[in-house]
Image (cartoon, helix red, strand yellow):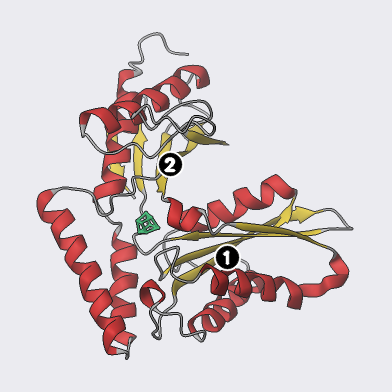
Amino acid sequence: MSSSFDYGIVEEAAKQSYIKALCDLPPDVRAALRKARDRETVPTARAIFEAMFKAIDIADAKKTLLCQDTGLPIYKVRVGSRFPWNCAAIKSCLYEGARRATQEFPFRSSSTHTLTRINPQTSVGPGLPVIYWDFVEDSDALDILMVPKGSGSENMSKMQMFYPQHGIKAVKKFILDTVVESAANPCPPGVIGVGLGGTSDLVMRLAKDAICRPVGQRHPDPQFAEMEEELEEAINATGRGPMGLGGDVSCLAVHVEHAYTHITQNPVAVNTQCWPARRARAVVLPDGSTTYGY
Ligand code: SF4
């Protein structure tokens, strides 16, 4: 750890990225929504898209929240091999940054105690923010991706442990059924994140990773890219439409992430992101400079 490094910079990056994620929709999501609106033929569905663009315009003009559900704070952190880091200090900064964002912006905390249901209005507590760590070779950056996760979409998450003999057909049916059963709850059309493989916990994480990818960015492996396209077509053919009220566009994209799994199992998970597929990025360098993006 570099004793001269000011960890207040990381705290500020955690705070500002949470606020930015809630207020400023990434350009790829805006473009995907425009494309979806342009190809939508059902008049009520088009009207819903117009209402979404109005919400985006208001958030841009007033620098305010896109949705009242501020979600649970999730930070995906990639620490470069040359970053003068101290993981314990960075973890405290993320906690404090999320708390300060909530109380200083201020916005509604969506986090609560599971038994007492008391909400301390801080967005943080045991286990929150959720932090995913990764470590990157040949980098001097601390890359913080902030993803607020609203409950309408998160409540629709599902995982199933299939056996290999069930085959890929059963896996695709499970994904499709999960999306259809979720109906209007996840505020469609959003990104459908699919996890394949790993263990029961890793597969859920893979599905979450999948929704964090820029909208429509295809999996680099053609086998999974093809599966994404096929599922997208099948989901859009359901006619669920924006906000579940019927239409041509039922999802903006399907993203698949995978890991190797046990020879006798085939875990599958679905994690949906809603139409405001919110995320923001802060990249901190050892000299203290911070760049914000998506
Ligand atoms: S699911 Fe998403 S868009 Fe719907 S209320 Fe929750 S955060 Fe907002």
Q: Residue at x 26, y 44 (%)?
A: 20
> Looking at the image, is 174 positioned above or below residue 40?
above
170, 85: nearer the viewer: 170
Where residue 237 sits: x, y (%)? 51, 86
Q: Residue at x 53, y 79 (%)?
A: 235
Q: Residue at x 49, y 29 (%)?
A: 116
Return the residue found at the far top: 3
What is the crowding at mark 1: few (fewer than 14 residues within 10 Å), some, or many (at least 20)?
Answer: few
Q: Secondary structure at mark 1?
A: loop
> Looking at the image, is 262 positioned above or below residue 46?
above
Do the numbered discs 1 and 2 sit on residues whose CB atoms are within 8 Å?
A: no
Residue 145 appears in which quarter of the rendering?
top left
Q: Is residue 107 left or right of residue 153?
A: left
Where residue 270 sits: x, y (%)? 60, 61
> Looking at the image, is 106 positioned above or below residue 167?
above
Return the residue found at the far front: 116
Where residue 220 sits: x, y (%)? 57, 65
Residue 49 appears in which quarter of the rendering?
bottom left
Q: Amino acid type of disc 2?
A: Leu
**Marks 1, 2: nearer the viewer:** 2
Q: Is residue 282 visible?
A: yes
Residue 26 appears in which quarter of the rendering?
bottom left
Tell me the number on the disc at residue 162: none
Q: Amino acid type of disc 1?
A: Pro
Mark 2 Cβ and ligand 1 under 8 Å apart: no
**Residue at mark 1:** 220
Q: Earlier in the sequence, mark 1 or mark 2?
A: 2
Q: Is residue 138 visible?
A: no
Tell me the number on the disc at residue 72: 2
